[in-house]
Image: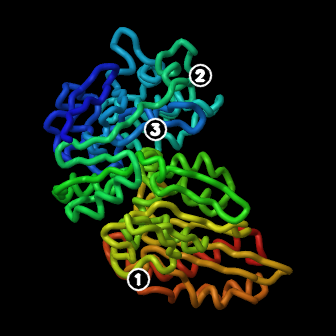
Amino acid sequence: MHTTRNVTVNGGPVPLTGVAPHTSALDLLRSQGLLGAKEGCAEGECGACAVLVARPGVAAETEWTAINACLVPAADLADQEVRTVEGLGTPGDLHPVQAELAGRGGSQCGYCTPGFVCSMAAEYYRPDRGEHFDLHALSGNLCRCTGYRPIRDAAQALGQPPAADALVARCAQAPPTLSSLEQGAFLRPVTLEAALRLLAERDDLTVVAGSTDLGVDVNLKGFRPAALLSIAHLDELRTFSVSGEAVEIGAALTLSEAERRLGDTVPLLSRLIPQFASRLIRNSATFGGSLGTASPIGDLAPVLLALDATLVLASARGTREVPVRDYFTGYRTSVRSRDEIIAALRIPLPAPAHVAFQKIAKRKFDDISSVAVAIAIDVEGGVVSRARIGLGGIAATPIRALATEATLIDRPWNRETIEAAAPVLAGEGTPMSDHRASSAYRSAMLGEALRRFGAEEMLEVS
């Protein structure tokens, strides 16, 4: 059944009539005269397009979440609630975030300011933030003229929102109810069974969840999908559980949601997630989406390799479990069939005791790794009893450093062992030279990663 739906923007309905599957939320908003959000990079790195979306919360029924409007398909906002910078305050009645930015000189040319306002507002309204404003909330917003000190000062000057604030009151209510949607070539079922049936019946569907990868292909590579199947909101894919044996994370749970639920249950994931792109990206990016691309430079795969994680693949034919070490088959290819989706990932417990995630990149945050190294080691009686090292950016697929692991296991955990293993790690994989780094640099960074790990763990390493 073909129906046309609305998205609620700043309290009023905006129809989605005639919206193509590849049309971004940003383009829709600007077509309505809401010009605060802007396109800067078109790939989720600058934050000029940030807006707020009301989503199911972690610490409240509903939370206002900042997202990159340039990446999200407009059709996927059907039945949802959006706030742009225009819906936060007016020139005569500034929102507290806007007032602090203006009063502290946090805006010059103003191009980036609406995005900063929305990211700051999301943190301002986060129910469990307490008195501390997490500046990482701004890690996906770039400013080229003001500089970050006055912006930081404005953020840190914000107090708690008043109880009478309408956006605070909204958080105490249930999130929007999303119903099944067929908007032209955009399909959004409400059950996993329906999604898998569509995948089995049609071969023209491109699966989308957070759209942090697909949106870049649409914007910068001109990709025009014949039809999109949205699975971002399926309850069966948004589960989270911790047992004595494993942590299970639904594939459509965003990295930000998982980060807040995990705490330090899996320390290696706790090291990774703050370095994964930016908060704006993590608010939409999903575990299944990151692995579904089978990218050799994604930061998540090396960590899951080091954790001996398993993926649950689902199709209309049933489910199967595949260890992450067996998932990748080649450059951007995997064992996943066309009609399968990643439903969940499982991480065995107890988690390794000594861990590190080292991201070698030009910027610490919001950048693609030249090399990613995930290390997980257990030591018993001064001897390495278990070693798992996952690597990204040094082969056509993410790989385990099997030779290095063999060099470490059953050896004393001391300087001599690390020095013996470091050159072995430097020889793993088949690193290439490109615009990010040379093959020699990548190899050198591998060896140094192990030495740095030893030093940071305060072991017998000088």
Q: Quadrant of the C terminus?
A: bottom right
Q: State if disc 1 and disc 2 touch (CB < 8 Å).
A: no
Applied colour scheme = rainbow
Residue under pointer 1? 431
Whole-angstrom CA distance, mark 3 to mark 1, is 36 Å
| Residue 150 shows up from this direction | no
- Disc 1 is placed on an element classified as loop
Residue for point 53% across, 76% down:
323
Tell me the kind of residue under disc 2. Answer: Gln
Of residue 97 and residue 15, the one placed in the foreground of this image is 15
Residue for point 77% across, 74% down:
459
Tell me the kind of residue under disc 3. Answer: Tyr
Sequence-wise first label, 3 or 1? 3
Splitting the image into 4 quarters, where does residue 439 fall? bottom left
Residue under pointer 3? 148
Residue under pointer 2? 160
Of residue 335 and residue 413, the one placed in the foreground of this image is 335
Please state if 377 lies on the left or on the right of 196 as rendered.
right
The nearer-to-camera label among 3 and 2 is 2
The nearer-to-camera label among 3 and 1 is 1
